[in-house]
Image (spheres, helix red, strand yellow):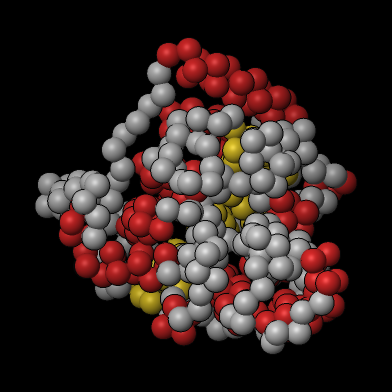
C-alpha cells in the first residue's frame, strides 16, 4: 500500500486559545499530541505535513448555524452578556463564556473545513484536526463544550460537492448535533458509537433513532452500557460498521476519535483502551478511502494526547509499536505510568458483568441489523 498524503491541522495561533482554567476541556491536548509525535520523528516528513487552519467565514458558518446564534457568539466573546444567552446554552458549566470563545471555535471549525477542502482538491488522503469534533453544537444552541459544529459543517461542504460521506463518531458522548444536521439526509450517513444516554450526556442516542424521510436508515446509534470494553466495542464495529461501509461505499469517511472512551477518563464510564481505536482505524484504512479525522472529547489530557498520536501514526501507516520504539512512552513522553509506546495496556472485562454487557449489546446489534441493513441491500 502506498504511503498516504497526510495533513495535520495545527498552528501556533490556535495553540494560544484556552477554555477557562476550571473547565475540563483542555485545548492544549492538540499541542501535546504534536509534541509527542515530533519527539518520535512521526509528525512531518514522508508525505506528512502540518497545515494551518483558517477561521471559518460567516458564509461557511451559516451552512449550519443561524445568523442570530453566530452574532450571539461574537457578542458574548466581547463581554456583552445577557440572561437570554442561557437559552442558547451559553454561560452553562459545560459551555462557559470567555474572551477566546468565538475566535477559537471559528478557527477550529475552519481547520475542519480546510481539511475537507484538502480532500476535495485531492491534496490529501488523510487529514487529522485534533481541534475538531464539536458534535454537540446545534443550529442555534451550544452544548457539551461545543459552540460551532465543525462536523456538520464539513459534512455539508463535502456533500454539496457531490460526495457521499460516512461519519463515524467514536466519542463516548452521542453526536446529537451531527445527528440533527443530517437526520433526514441520505448524503451523510451518521453512525455514533457512544455510552448509553441512560448514564451519560446528552441523555439520548437510542438505537431506535434511525433517520426520517430520505434519511431513514442513514442514522445509526449504537449505545453501549457503562463498563463496555475493547472486545465488545470492536465486535460491534465489525458486525455493524464494516458491512455498512462496504454497502454504502462512501467517497469520504469522517471519523471522530473521542478519547473519552478510555477507562481513565474522569467524565465517562466505559472501560476501553486506545487499542480499540487504533484497531478500528487500521480496519478503516483498508477501504482506501480519504479520511477526515477529528479530535472531540477526552478529559484526561495526557492519555488523550497519546491516543491521538496513536491515531495519527495508525492512519499514516507508521509502525511505531515494534521493538525499536518500545520505551518511547513513559518518562520519555512525560509520564511515569506506562513505558511501552503509544498503545495502552490491554484490558478485558471478565465474568458475569462481561456476559451481561455482551448480551445487551448483542440485542442492540440484532435490532440495528434488521432496521438498517435492508435499506442498504444487506440481507
Q: Quadrant of the C terminus?
A: top right
The residue under the point 28% across, 64% down is 36
Tell me what residue is drawn at x 59 percent, y 38 percent.
195
Question: Quadrant of the rendered structure where residue 87 is?
Answer: bottom right
Query: Residue 250: where, in percent of width, then height?
Result: 61, 52
Percent position of residue 263, x then y: 43, 39
Please tell me in which quadrant of the rendered image residue 141 appears: bottom right
Using the image as rendered, state which of residue 289 and residue 367 is in the foreground: 367
Q: Nearer the viewer, residue 175 or 226?
A: 226
Q: Quadrant of the N terminus?
A: bottom left
**Which residue corresponds to the image point at 41% horizontal and 58% vertical from the top-left?**
301
Where is residue 368 shown, x and y percent of the image?
69, 29
Q: Is residue 279 visible in this depiction of the protein? A: no
377 vs 99: above or below:
above
* Rendered view: 74 above or below 341: below
Q: Is residue 271 left or right of residue 90?
A: left
Q: Is residue 82 visible?
A: yes
Amino acid at each position: 500500500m502506498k504511503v498516504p498524503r497526510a495533513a495535520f491541522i495545527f498552528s501556533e495561533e490556535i495553540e494560544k486559545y484556552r477554555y477557562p482554567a476550571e473547565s475540563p476541556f483542555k485545548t492544549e491536548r492538540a499541542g501535546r499530541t504534536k509534541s509527542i509525535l515530533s519527539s518520535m520523528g512521526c509528525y512531518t516528513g514522508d508525505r506528512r505535513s502540518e497545515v494551518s487552519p483558517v477561521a471559518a467565514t460567516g458564509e461557511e458558518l451559516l451552512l449550519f448555524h443561524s445568523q442570530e446564534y453566530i452574532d450571539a457568539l461574537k457578542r458574548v466573546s466581547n463581554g456583552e452578556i445577557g440572561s437570554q444567552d442561557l437559552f442558547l446554552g451559553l454561560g452553562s458549566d459545560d459551555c462557559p463564556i470567555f474572551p477566546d470563545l468565538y475566535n477559537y471555535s471559528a478557527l477550529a471549525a475552519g481547520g475542519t473545513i480546510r481539511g475537507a477542502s484538502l480532500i476535495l482538491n485531492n491534496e490529501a488522503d488523510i487529514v487529522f484536526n485534533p481541534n475538531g469534533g464539536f458534535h454537540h453544537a446545534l443550529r442555534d444552541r451550544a452544548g457539551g463544550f461545543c459552540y460551532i459544529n465543525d462536523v456538520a459543517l464539513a459534512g455539508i461542504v463535502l456533500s454539496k460537492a457531490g460526495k457521499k460521506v460516512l461519519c463515524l463518531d467514536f466519542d463516548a458522548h452521542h453526536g446529537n448535533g451531527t445527528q440533527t444536521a443530517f437526520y433526514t439526509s441520505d448524503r451523510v450517513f451518521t453512525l455514533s458509537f457512544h455510552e448509553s444516554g441512560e448514564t451519560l450526556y446528552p441523555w439520548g442516542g437510542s438505537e431506535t433513532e434511525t433517520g426520517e424521510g430520505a434519511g431513514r436508515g442513514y442514522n445509526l446509534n449504537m449505545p453501549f452500557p457503562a463498563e463496555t470494553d475493547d472486545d465488545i466495542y470492536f465486535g460491534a464495529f465489525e458486525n455493524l460498521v464494516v458491512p455498512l461501509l462496504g454497502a454504502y461505499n462512501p467517497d469520504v469517511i469522517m471519523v471522530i476519535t473521542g478519547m473519552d472512551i478510555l477507562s481513565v477518563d474522569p467524565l465517562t464510564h466505559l472501560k476501553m483502551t486506545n487499542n480499540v481505536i487504533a484497531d478500528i482505524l487500521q480496519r478503516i484504512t483498508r477501504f482506501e478511502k480519504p479520511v477526515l479525522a477529528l479530535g472531540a472529547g477526552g478529559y484526561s489530557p495526557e492519555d488523550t494526547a497519546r491516543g491521538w498520536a496513536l491515531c495519527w501514526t495508525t492512519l499514516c501507516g507508521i509502525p511505531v509499536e515494534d521493538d525499536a520504539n518500545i520505551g518511547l512512552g513513559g518518562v520519555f513522553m512525560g509520564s511515569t505510568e506506562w513505558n511501552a509506546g503509544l498503545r495502552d495496556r490491554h484490558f478485558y472485562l471478565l465474568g458475569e458483568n462481561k456476559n451481561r454487557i455482551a448480551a445487551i449489546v448483542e440485542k442492540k446489534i440484532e435490532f440495528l441489523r434488521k432496521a438498517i441493513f435492508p435499506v442498504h441491500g444487506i440481507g
